[in-house]
Amino acid sequence: AQSVTQLDSHVSVSEGTPVLLRCNYSSSYSPSLFWYVQHPNKGLQLLLKYTSAATLVKGINGFEAEFKKSETSFHLTKPSAHMSDAAEYFCVVSEYNQGGKLIFGQGTELSVKP
Amino acid sequence: GAGVSQSPSNKVTEKGKDVELRCDPISGHTALYWYRQSLGQGLEFLIYFQGNSAPDKSGLPSDRFSAERTGGSVSTLTIQRTQQEDSAVYLCASSLAPGQPEKGDYGYTFGSGTRLTVV
């Protein structure tokens, strides 16, 4: 069965510094992997997704993630944090043979200090 | 419709009452999913529909929870005899051809959710 572990429940960075949100997954088959963002009192927004194409995936708002099968990781990065990036981030895995069911990590809260 | 619509957006109910939550997916999306997000928690899978059938209902917490989907479209999640621990945001998502990326964009669209408060 697939699972997702987000290694940090909370990350705090200063504006203009790099962001790294860590995610490890467990999957029996070739997974699809996603990062979603949820701003306070807002709905879920897809940042980016990996579906067996290029291992380096670029998303919206300058975010990107690299699929590393050998490390079973899918860490999210951004070169320079902006105040508007403060939100909850979820790493998500899905497997084709599970009907496309999404399994969410517990989330990482990102704080951005001025 | 243009997006996934959920109603009501907010629901306050007394402990022991039954509630129905509605999800109207994007037209043509065959797959529909229900998730629950409790305070400070991630999203917990509840049930998945492919058309009108539910191949995976493994996430339903108890037999007080049930869901149905009719006409391959609207879905209703029913919680009977609500308890305070049922308080959460219930999210619905729909997708076209999940598990079949060769058929195109492997995307999901989430609704804005129903915030359920049991008092």
Image (spheres, rainbow, N blue to C red):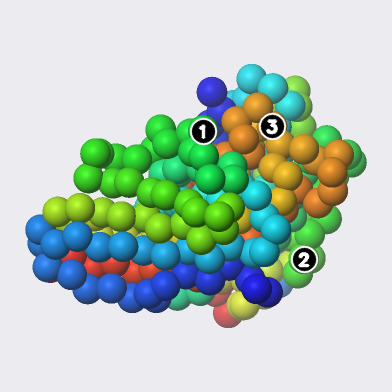
Kindly give the residue lying farthest to the right in the view shown. Answer: A54
Q: Position of residue B93 (x, y in %)?
A: 56, 57
At mark 2, the secondary structure is helix
Q: Is residue B75 left or right of residue A98?
A: left
Q: Residue at x 40, y 58 (%)?
A: B76
Image quarter in which the N terminus of chain B is found: bottom right
Residue B106 in view of the camera: yes
Position of A97 compared to B35: left or right? right
Disc 3 sits on a residue from what chain?
Answer: A
List x then y, in percent, for residue A26: 59, 26
Q: Residue at x 51, y 33 (%)?
A: B55
Circle 3 packing at 10 Å, graded few (<14), some (14-19), many (20+), is some
The reply to the same-chain question for discs 2 and 1 is no
Q: Which residue is mark 1?
A: B55
Q: Amino acid at mark 2?
A: Ile
Q: Which residue carries the number 2 mark?
A: A60
The quadrant of the picture occupied by the C terminus of chain B is: bottom left
The residue that appears at 64% across and 20% down in the rendered structure is: A28
The image shows residue B92 at horizontal and vertical percentages of 50, 58
Q: Chain of mark 2?
A: A
